[in-house]
């Protein structure tokens, strides 16, 4: 990769939206319609967008908007959501992304928010900038015809079918309760709810409008269509499944699997989701892939680490390597009764991680021993590694609330 000094980095203006939309369309293969563009303009201002320009021609873009994220223990932490990141295929391998990200993240440092988050179209891009994959999901294909629930499971009593108009009234409150108890989940802006219920044709992937099953503590939103290469076999694609209680999850799945004309159900669930334990045959759901969701970068290490809770009491010095920004260094990490006090330290680290590994560990989706086995966590002793691993563990998997 070479650096092209003819490229300039600047913030966007209102006159740049057409160029921004063109770059995004070429990068992600979809032309935004006018309604989607107007909603994006509500989420962010042009002054929060960085452009790379070759002369007067924009050839790269990255934008950001304010966002909150629930962290282990239930606190909601301010973050910056990075989105719409792309470089034109005419200008690859010139260091443009790094220059845009440098300008953007210097602004983040000035703003002082403890976290920066994003969702990644490719898994190989963002670790170099200190981001780590912090939530993960499993893609399942379920042959509904062969699902049977355990006989000791109570039958569904709280779930019902609702119209889109009813769902519009019910879902935001249910989602809000779930989000506040789920690490990794973000509050849903009103503009995103508007887009969700607008249910525009370009969001359906050739399938139906949304159907809704609602429980007082959860819901499923899904589409129906016909499987490619079959003689009229129907498939249901679950767009969103939210369950704030175990009862809601059980009821919703029993109703979902009772839709007679549907042969298969496609769904993404967090690792360790209880669905398999509800079924008499746990092999019916077939894994078709594993995907990451939210990527996290700790901008302010003491503030971010102090905000979440921890599983054990310990006292360690954690070394953080951050060649991209200024979060690197040694931190004294003391946990008591679940809470942490984190300060800069001049002592040698007991455990050393990169900024990206720390981002992956932060919400509890991954364990430090996984990274240590790959040579990505260094420790002075097995005791230090063991305590570091246990401390960051969480009782449940984090889950992204919505992609952006």
Image (cartoon, rainbow, N blue to C red):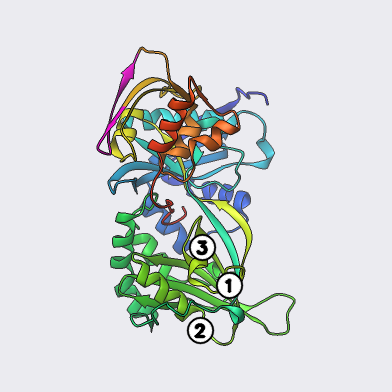
238 vs 393, nearest the viewer: 393
Label whose residue precedes the other's in the sequence (2 or 1): 2
Residue receiving disc 3? 33
Q: In which quarter of the image is the N terminus?
A: top right
Q: Position of residue 152 (x, y in %)?
A: 43, 78
219 vs 167, nearest the viewer: 219
Mark 2 element type: loop
Q: Where is residue 402 in the image (x, y as percent from the top left)?
A: 43, 57
Residue 239 in view here:
yes
Numbered marks: total: 3
Residue receiving disc 2? 258
Mark 1 element type: loop
Residue at 40 percent across and 49 percent down: it is 184
Residue at 53 percent across and 51 percent down: it is 21
- Closer to the camera: disc 2 or disc 1? 1
Name the main secondary structure of what is drawn in magenta.
strand
244 vs 18, nearest the viewer: 244
Q: Position of residue 252 (x, y in %)?
A: 42, 75
Mark 3 element type: loop
Does 300 sit left or right of 324 as displayed?
A: left
Label whose residue precedes the other's in the sequence (1 or 3): 3
- Closer to the camera: disc 3 or disc 2? 2
Does 294 sit left or right of 193 as displayed?
A: right
Residue receiving disc 1? 281
Residue 55 in view here:
no
Looking at the image, residue 342 lies above or below residue 72: above
Mark 2 and mark 3 in contact (Cβ < 8 Å)?
no
Inter-mark Cα distance, 1 to 3:
44 Å
Looking at the image, residue 273 lies above or below residue 45: below
Over which residues does the magenta segment extend?
A: 334-345
- Closer to the camera: disc 1 or disc 3? 1
Q: How crowded is mark 1: few (under 14 residues within 10 Å), some or many (20 or more)?
A: some
């Amino acid at each position: 990769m070479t650096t092209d000094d003819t490229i300039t980095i600047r913030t966007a203006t209102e006159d740049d939206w057409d160029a921004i939309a063109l770059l995004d369309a070429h990068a992600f293969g979809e032309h935004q319609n006018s309604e989607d563009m107007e909603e994006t303009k509500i989420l962010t201002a042009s002054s929060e967008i960085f452009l790379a320009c070759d002369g007067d021609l924009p050839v790269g873009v990255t934008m950001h908007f304010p966002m909150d994220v629930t962290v282990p223990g239930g606190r909601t932490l301010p973050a910056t959501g990075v989105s719409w990141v792309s470089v034109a295929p005419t200008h690859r391998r010139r260091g443009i992304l790094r220059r845009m990200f440098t300008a953007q993240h210097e602004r983040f440092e000035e703003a002082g928010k403890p976290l920066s988050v994003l969702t990644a179209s490719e898994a190989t891009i963002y670790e170099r900038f200190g981001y780590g994959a912090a939530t993960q999901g499993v893609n399942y294909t379920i042959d509904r015809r062969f699902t049977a629930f355990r006989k000791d499971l109570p039958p569904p009593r709280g779930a019902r079918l609702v119209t889109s108009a009813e769902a519009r009234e019910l879902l935001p409150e249910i989602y809000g309760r779930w989000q506040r108890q789920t690490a990794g989940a973000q509050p849903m802006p009103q503009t995103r709810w508007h887009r969700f219920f607008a249910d525009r044709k370009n969001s359906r992937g050739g399938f139906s409008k949304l159907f809704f099953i609602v429980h007082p503590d959860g819901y499923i939103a899904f589409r129906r269509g016909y499987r490619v290469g079959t003689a009229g076999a129907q498939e249901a694609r679950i767009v969103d499944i939210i369950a704030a209680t175990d009862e809601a999850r059980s009821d919703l799945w029993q109703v979902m699997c009772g839709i007679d004309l549907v042969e298969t159900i496609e769904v993404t669930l967090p690792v360790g989701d209880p669905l398999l334990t509800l079924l008499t045959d746990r092999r019916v759901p077939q894994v078709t892939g594993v995907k990451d969701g939210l990527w996290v970068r700790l901008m302010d290490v003491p503030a971010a680490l102090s905000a979440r809770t921890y599983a054990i009491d310990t006292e360690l010095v954690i070394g953080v390597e951050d060649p991209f920004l200024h979060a690197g260094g040694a931190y004294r990490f003391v946990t008591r009764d679940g809470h942490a006090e984190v300060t800069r330290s001049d002592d040698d680290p007991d455990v050393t991680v990169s900024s990206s590994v720390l981002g992956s560990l932060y919400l509890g989706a991954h364990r430090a021993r996984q990274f240590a086995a790959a040579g990505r966590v260094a420790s002075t002793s097995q005791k230090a590694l063991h305590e570091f691993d246990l401390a960051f563990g969480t009782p449940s998997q984090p889950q992204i609330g919505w992609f952006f």
